[in-house]
Amino acid sequence: MTIRPIVGMGAVAATGSGVGELFENLCAGISGRAELRGFDRTRFRAQHAYEVDDRPAVGEDVPGRASRLLHEAIAQAAADAGLGEDLSGIPILVGTGLRELRSLELWWRDGSPFADSGLHFGTGLRERFNADVTHTFSNACSASLYALALGSDLLSQEGEDAPDTVIVAGVDVLTESMYGLLERVHPTPPDRVRPFDRNRTGVLMGDGAAAIVLRRSAEDTDRVYGHLRGVAVNCDAYHVTAPSPEGIAQAMRAAHKLAGVKPSDVDLVMLHGTGTLLNDEAEATALADVLGDDASVPLMTAVKSMTGHTSGASGLINLIVGVQALNEGRVPPTVGLDEPVEEAAPFRFVTGQPAVDQPLKVAQLNAFGFGGINAVAIVEGIR
Amino acid sequence: MTAQSLDTTVVVTGAAVLLPGADTVRALADGPAAGGAPVEPAAHVGRKGLRYKDRATQLGYALTAAALRDAGLLGADEKDGLSVPAASVGVVASSNFGNLDTVARALDTIREETVTATSPMDLPNASSNVVASSAAIRYGLRGPNLMVCNGETSGLDAVHWAATMIAAGRTERVLVLGVEPDNEVVRRLLGGGHAVDGGAALVLESRTAAELRSATVRAVVGPYRRGAADSAEAGRRWQLPEHLGTASGAHGLLQVAAAVGLFDSGESGPVQAVAGSADGDARADLLLLAPRAA
């Protein structure tokens, strides 16, 4: 077991920019849901999403938004950790579901300028931060926790070239193709994200980015927000879109083992909770199995009910919100969760009002992606 | 956790290549002639299961099967399954152009008709990691599964991350895959050029795991570096013949596969794989050592 301090954090989503604003809004139950802003709505049955409201005009999309949000989150985290704006030599690991595919779409149909060097984030990070050790991982909805696993592996390396600081980030914005294909597979077009609710209609996408600065040790750091205790990653090898409760449960058990925690040690679970028809039941089944007799011990919440499904960013948004929750003893509610599905019956969901004055120490973060790629992390607060 | 020992050396125990004009690492090392026939995935893995899969995924299947067989991990018949535990094999795939055709086609349908006219079968292919996850599903590889889409250096970065996960004890071996399909979207993006429409795959293992199953070591993975500075000459460099087109995310894997071909043919000095450029995003280089030299 190796414990790594988290020394800087940054985030942006439909519900706010900056870790403090985002967390306050989530605790207040404020949702980022709105009518589609960047697409021609007449092409779609679903009409809503959880977008960051940063376009020059409604209905008019602009290229490069994923990079812009990513840069914003990284700049926040780097400043927070006192790294400054020159990030040369510092590994930056970016998890994403959809890269800059929205910019590709705007090039393909609307003729905006684009080159293949703009599909991934390295070129923009070099221009903006002089960063040259950059990696874009396109690992669907578990991408940023996969990136976190690799970042922690880098910090465990020995030798003179081994880094002592790593930036891990996640980002995604809506693409027309993914938004459309996702709603296409729903019998009724989804209207809002209601994780774990019996009457949910499915998933809707959200824009978001998050970044953290992770260090080898807490020496020479002013502030530590929390500690990463371990991240486990695996693959169901089962189906391209449907999840497997067995594969998810294995990832959870592996994370507990890596982190040296027992199910009864987990005080808070930041659920993946996408509101997708099959996925919430699969996550609940796996979690109930792993927690066993302790299934009613931890508080649980799913912030996608307010941020939408931010895909590759979502794992790290969960981490940042989870760390804030541990340190403040406050947990944002799951909005729109009225009647939990049967598989989630034993769970202690936070609904309605935020939970406050909670003694919380250890949080589990879940992220699962298309192709059955699962990632589970365990973090510890500093309270 | 899987077996972890003090020896963090990572070795190559299997390699495969599929390009027009080359289907062995030796043919690749020699430099494929122009005018080779396009790769037919069905000729390598049969037609079953290829429907609804995009070109990159189909190429990935064929390369995965060939590399696993070359490493002695998969029998002649796919149904025989793996000779090692499923969780002991991870996947790292590299591709930049992999699913661009699906994205463009779905978008065209949405714009010209409506979302109702799109095909639900396109949903998995719209996710850029479909190459990595599909290889895992078809061949039952349950270790960590990673898709690297990192521009010009992507293939060498993929080898680096596979080696990193092995050294960290996350998995004993990784199937590393690099493919780039050629199609209308890619050609327009490349301003008239074309992509290689093929790729290469490797099996990387910890030396300990390779020794335990008496696998033949074909190359040893040496130091990797990514950064803005140019790298010093450290070994023989193999060049991809220009007529094959842009290799992009497959470029690094093709260079490593060519290095294995050179070592198989008796080369004993190091081979240096390089990708990207110092004035662009960044440059990556990786040193490959002959089996007995390390």
Image (cartoon, coloured by chain):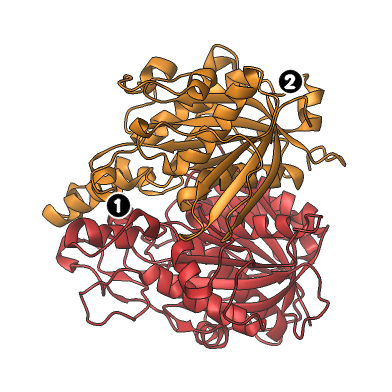
Chain colours: A red, B orange
Q: Quadrant of residue A163?
A: bottom right
Q: Is residue A2 left or right of residue A200?
A: right
Q: Tell me which residue sits at (58%, 25%) in the image.
A: B15
Q: Is residue B168 left or right of residue B288?
A: right
Provide the chain ID for the residue under circle 2.
B
Q: The C terminus of chain A is located in which quarter?
A: bottom right
Q: Tell me which residue sits at (80%, 24%) in the image.
A: B211
Which of A41/B277 is in front?
B277
Q: Where A150 sits versus A85, above or below?
A: above
What percent of the width, then of the height, locates residue A142? Answer: 54, 56
Q: Mark 2 — residue?
A: B215
Q: Is residue B166 left or right of residue A65?
A: right
What percent of the width, then of the height, locates residue A310? Answer: 45, 66
Q: Mark 1 — residue?
A: A181
Provide the chain ID for the residue under circle 1.
A
Q: Amino acid at mark 1?
A: Leu
Q: Quadrant of residue B243?
A: top left
Furthest residue toward right:
B6
Q: Is residue A371 left or right of residue B50?
A: right
Count of marks placed on residues = 2
